[in-house]
Image (tube, helix red, strand yellow):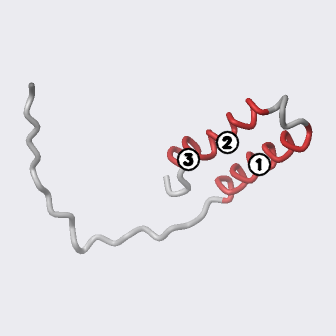
């Protein structure tokens, strides 16, 4: 089995943090997905259950992890 060696590095103290700015496309994308889930639920929740679950999973995991407005 391989051994893992770590070399500790002290983070730079004087580094300025980037100011957070929101990207309206990010917020609009989340809003659009939520509206789509709401529409599918109102139309026929039983038939559209798989689509609702797919959108819900995307909003909860992938969308939030990979699509950061700070990137």
Among all residues in the image, which is located at the extreme top?
Answer: 1
Label ID, residue 56: 2
* Relative height, residue 67 to residue 18 (above, below): above
Label ID, residue 32: 1
| Residue at figure coordinates x 42%, y 68% from the top left | 18
Q: CA distance from mark 2 to mark 1?
A: 12 Å
* Relative height, residue 7 to residue 23 (above, below): above
**Which badge, 2 or 1, comes first in the chain's sequence?**
1
User: Looking at the image, do the residues carrying marks 2 and 1 touch, with CB atoms under 8 Å apart?
Assistant: no
Where disc 1 sits, the SS reads helix
User: Looking at the image, do the residues carrying marks 3 and 1 touch, with CB atoms under 8 Å apart?
Assistant: no
Label ID, residue 67: 3
Front position in the image: 58 or 28: 58
Q: Position of residue 3 (x, y in %)?
A: 7, 33
**Which badge, 2 or 3, comes first in the chain's sequence?**
2
Q: CA distance from mark 3 to mark 1?
A: 14 Å
């Amino acid at each position: 089995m391989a051994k893992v060696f770590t070399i500790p590095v002290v983070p730079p103290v004087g580094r300025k943090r980037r100011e957070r700015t929101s990207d309206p496309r990010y917020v609009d994308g989340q809003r659009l997905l939520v509206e789509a889930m709401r529409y599918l639920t109102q139309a026929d929740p039983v038939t559209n259950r798989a689509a609702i679950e797919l959108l819900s999973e995307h909003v909860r995991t992938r969308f939030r992890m990979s699509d950061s407005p700070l990137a």
